[in-house]
Amino acid sequence: MRHLLEIDDLTPDELGAVIERCEAAPETLGAPYAGRGVACLFEKPSARTRNSTEIAVVQLGGHPVYIVGDEVGIDKRETAEDIARTLACYHHAICARVFRHSVLERMAALDVAPVINLLSDEGHPLQAIADVLTIRAELGSVEGKVVTYVGDANNVTRSLALAVGYLGGTTRVASPSGYRFSDRDLDRLTLAGVLVESFEHAGEALEGADVVYTDTWVSMGQEAERERRLRDFEGFCVDDRLLSVAGPRAVFMHCLPAHRGEEVAASVLDGPQSRIWPQAANRLRSARGVLAWIAEQNGIA
Ligand code: CP
Ligand code: NVA
């Protein structure tokens, strides 16, 4: 059974096949989930992911069922395995946003239904697919492009680096000490054939960048570290001065939700180089393409 927990669950060719489905007109994808359910389980809040996934399921003929984490109580009310087995009695796919990536791995290991990662502490593959769709639409291709990520090397960064690297782009990551990719992360990227350049200073990383990307300094689940993180990330706000290093042709991207005046200045987020709204819109294409590809791979037709 095929699942999608992270971009490197795919080969580069398979990512290409997923992108083809994302960019296809919705009516060409048929209705593989007709008369079928798709579980959409969320342990954390969401605006883009929940809505894009639910609408994608509807466009593919299916019925999404939204489930709040507390309702099923992963490893509290019952084990992640029992929840997956239960959901698989009624649904043809389990899409889940969780705190611990290992929960997704345990659910997927059962092979009772395809599991799709809607964000975990480790990765955010559907976001990364929307991001490369946006780069392709804005700049023609990812190949040969430099994507500079400024800020916390987090779940979004890991998936982004994999997707950009698979498509022949380069990712640079500029973060303060303590917030860079770990050796384990770098090993995993290398194993996937993806090279990431790490920088101490955002300025250096931004020279010649085609895309400037940032995300929150305080991810969901890290709220208790907020004060420390805001101090540690001082100097890493993507403002007009930093964006000007990349130059006027660079585009700015952010997965959202954004915090104006923290990781990004309002003038950049809402400015002429920002592509955040086409990027958010691409979340629907990303979810639809992935669900269509997962249906094909798993014989859901
Ligand atoms: N980018 C993203 O995943 O947004 P949500 O948290 O609102 O789903
Ligand atoms: N890194 C952020 C992404 C939100 C879409 C988080 O995990 O909260």
Image: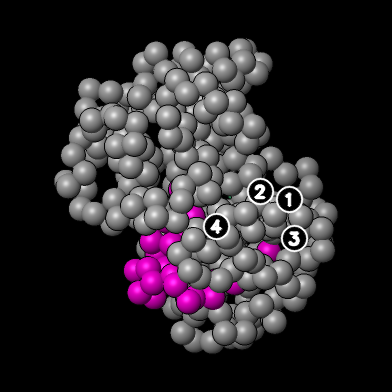
Reply above or below: 149 against 27.
Answer: below
Question: What separation in Å lies between label 3 and label 1 (alpha carbons)?
Answer: 11 Å
Residue drawn at x 66%, y 48% as measured from the top left:
219
Which marked residue is nearer to the observer: mark 4 or mark 3?
4
Question: Mark 3 belongs to which amino acid?
Answer: Arg
Q: Is residue 146 magenta?
A: yes
SS state under label 2: loop
Q: Which residue is mark 4?
A: 162
In the image, the segment drawn in magenta is 126-151
Compare marks 2 and 1 and give the one earlier in the sequence: 1
Q: Which residue is mark 1?
A: 184
Reply above or below: 111 against 251.
Answer: above
Q: Which residue is mark 3?
A: 180
Residue 190 rendering spot, x and y as whole percentages: 64, 58
Residue drawn at x 72%, y 44% as measured from the top left:
222
Image quadrant assignment for residue 276: bottom left
Residue drawn at x 65%, y 42% as measured from the top left:
121
Residue 116 rendering spot, x and y as whole percentages: 46, 36
Mark 3 and 2 residues: CB-CB less than 8 Å, in contact?
no
Q: Where the N terminus falls, by quadrant?
A: top left
Residue drawn at x 35%, y 50% as measured from the top left:
18
Mark 2 and 1 residues: CB-CB less than 8 Å, in contact?
no
Q: Nearer the viewer, residue 140 or 270?
A: 140
Number of residues whose C-alpha sits closer than 10 Å to that of mark 4, classed few (under 14), some (14–19) or many (20 or more)? many
Residue 150 visible in the picture: no
